[in-house]
Image (spheres, grey):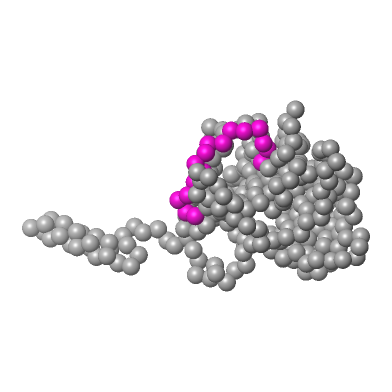
Amino acid sequence: MRSLHLIVFIVISLAKASKSDDGFCSAPSLVESDEKTKPIYWKATNPTLSPSHLQDLPGFTRSVYKRDHALITPESHVYSPLPDWKNTLGAYLITPATGSHFVMYLAKMKEMSSSGLPPQYIERLVFVVEGAVTLTNTSSSSKTLTVDSYAYLPPNFHHSLDCVESATLVVFERRYEHLGSHTTELIVGSTDKQPLLETPGEVFELRKLLPVSLAYDFNIHIMDFQPGEFLNVKEVHYNQHGLLLLEGQGIYRLGDNWYPVQAGDVIWMAPFVPQWYAALGKTRSRYLLYKDVNRNPL
């Protein structure tokens, strides 16, 4: 009889727990109560490892480098002064040492900082992840770039990026590949001003930051996935990619490997590596993706 009473008590307790607001064995909310008051992309510049018990584990990193892909996670970033930049530290994430034909790095600009110029014949795109900078060119005109703003600087274009307080930029640079008489020009814009493009057979939202024109030998895509959405196509193609996850979390397939990823992670994808993404969690996934275009792969 005493055993029967114990069983009844346990069943009633489980039933009450399942009817509670949180539910029995419910996972804690992934969305902090004050997240709405934080600036956009704050997780990309203040990432944490998950689960929390691994945050301070000596020697632990999720970073992986292989022949045809790399996952570079924030705990393995190494910052050092950027050549010709003032009061700025940089972390090179993708370089020709990995096999890429472009460079991708983070630039952390401190108080009263300024940029240097890229080498001759090198084009540059900067995207503001945190803070604000002022872009000035040879005509003495200036534009303020805030979070989600970007600027494309043609090769040999004299310019300066100046920061009064602090800012974090993601920077892409590559040697411009001329095609006939086509030339590029200065472009300044913001993500929210770019139109949504059609994605036949897919569910994600797509914006392109640069013109779809033969003059440009690369583009930057902004891709948004709601929780549970994923790429339909399992991509295998000749293009190279450099990716920064700005928001959210999910699973990225690279080759035969499956990687949990979150805001702040960077991925390099070599030509023809199988690739696929699915968004998880309770918030939108957004990533910024470099892609080479409009040039013969020969």
Whether residue 291 is visible, yes or no, is: yes
Examine the structure image and report whether residue 11 is included in the region drawn in magenta: no
Residue 231: image x %, image y %? 51, 43
Q: How many marks?
A: 0
Q: Position of residue 174 (x, y in %)?
A: 79, 43
User: Which quarter of the picture shows residue 98?
Assistant: top right
Extent of the magenta region: 226-241
Q: Residue furthest front?
A: 181
Q: Compare residues 269 and 262 and report the one nearer the observer.
A: 269
Q: Is residue 141 above or below residue 254?
A: below
Asked where in the image residue 36 lies, by quadrant, the reply is bottom right
Q: Where's residue 118, x and y in %?
A: 86, 49
Residue sitting at 76 percent across and 54 percent down? 126
Q: Position of residue 35 (x, y in %)?
A: 54, 67
User: Quick check: is 234 in the magenta stretch?
Assistant: yes
| Left or right: residue 53 compared with residue 192 | left
Residue 251 visible: no
- Please state if 217 lies on the left or on the right of 245 as rendered: right
Residue lying farthest to the left in this orientation: 1
Image height of 231 relative to 45, above or below? above
> Which residue is depicted at the point 64% across and 62% down?
192
Which residue is pictured at 86% across the width and 63% down the height? 136
For the residue pair 64 and 53, the one nearer the viewer reads as: 64
Q: Nearer the viewer, residue 29 or 131?
A: 131
Assign the C terminus to one quadrant of the image.
top right
Residue depicted at 24% across the width and 60% down the height: 14
Q: Quadrant of residue 131?
A: bottom right
Magenta-colored segment: predominant secondary structure = loop
Q: Quadrant of the N terminus?
A: bottom left
